[in-house]
Amino acid sequence: MTIRVAVIGAGVMGADHARIISSEIPGAELHCVCDADQTKARGAADATGARNVSQDPLATIEDKEVDAVLIASPDDTHAELTLASLRARKPVLCEKPLSQDVAECLRVLQAENTLGKRLIQVGYMRRFDPPYVEMKDRSTRDGIGAPIMMHNFHRNVSAPPNFTGQMAITNSAPHEFDIATR
Ligand SMILES: NC(=O)c1ccc[n+]([C@@H]2O[C@H](COP(=O)([O-])OP(=O)(O)OC[C@H]3O[C@@H](n4cnc5c(N)ncnc54)[C@H](O)[C@@H]3O)[C@@H](O)[C@H]2O)c1
């Protein structure tokens, strides 16, 4: 069985997801790369051998030849595109955050609950990262007990030019919230 995947957003993350899907995931086929910028879509498709490119994310999600969707476009597009994937009843890996707005996150979760099927995964990879898994194991298995305080650092080489102070909470801190609630 081959799962035909569409990657939406072919920037830093999307291009890497496209590379991984096309070269490292058995049973997955990179069916389409979609980006609002056609040059980026074409560049990622050429680099990965994807057959199709698109500039229209909603049409890409509805495409009958697409089985699953990976959303790596900017944060403010995630909820709308995830809802469209649910309407099409397609599994979706949405890069974090699901939305920049709590009420909108809840609307997306409500839509998934109404379908009665788990179709959404959000790109929280730290929960699979061995040092984090070890930290969790030590606090439970080794009897250290529940942490009472967290002190987080997040270091990047540089912040993207469009990164605002508010995004420290809506874009970056969700990784911390995710591991704290695992
Ligand atoms: N899981 C993680 O650790 C992690 C790390 C970095 C970024 N991210 C998330 O991944 C997403 C993408 O980040 P990035 O650094 O790759 O950004 P980026 O700016 O490099 O890429 C975004 C791409 O989306 C395209 N785009 C914009 N609007 C679009 C639309 N409506 N439809 C289709 N394409 C559209 C842009 O042309 C661009 O090529 C962000 O939501 C970010 O929060 C997650």
Image: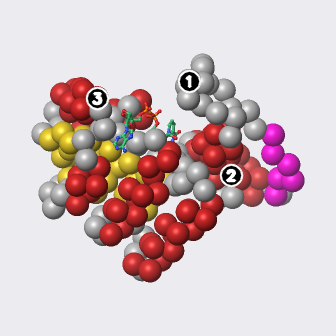
Q: Residue at x 30, y 38 (%)?
A: 35
In-front residue for pair 28/173: 173
Q: Position of residue 105 (x, y in %)?
A: 56, 62
Which residue is at the front of the view, 31 or 78?
78
Q: Quadrant of ligand 1?
A: top left
- Of callouts 3 and 1, which one flags the residue occurring earlier in the amino acid sequence? 3
Q: Is mark 2 within 8 Å of ligand 1?
A: no
Which mark, residue 161? 1
Q: Position of residue 4 (x, y in %)?
A: 20, 53
User: Residue at position x 33%, y 35% from top?
Assistant: 10
As measured in the structure, the alpha-carbon distance from the residue carrying label 2 to the one carrying label 3 is: 32 Å
For the point 29% across and 49% down, the residue is 57
At label 2, the amino acid type is Phe
Q: Nearer the viewer, mark 1 or mark 2?
A: 1
Indicate yes or no: mark 3 CB to ligand 1 under 8 Å: yes
- Locate residue 54: give its quadrant: top left
The answer to whether 19 appears left or right of 153 in the picture is: left
Quadrant assignment for the C terminus:
bottom right
Q: Which mark is residue 40?
A: 3
The amino acid sitting under disc 1 is: Pro
The front one of 63 and 140 is: 63
Specify the segment rendered in magenta. Answer: 146-151
Distance, label 3 to label 1, CA atoms, is 19 Å
The x, y position of residue 36, in whole percent, is 31, 38
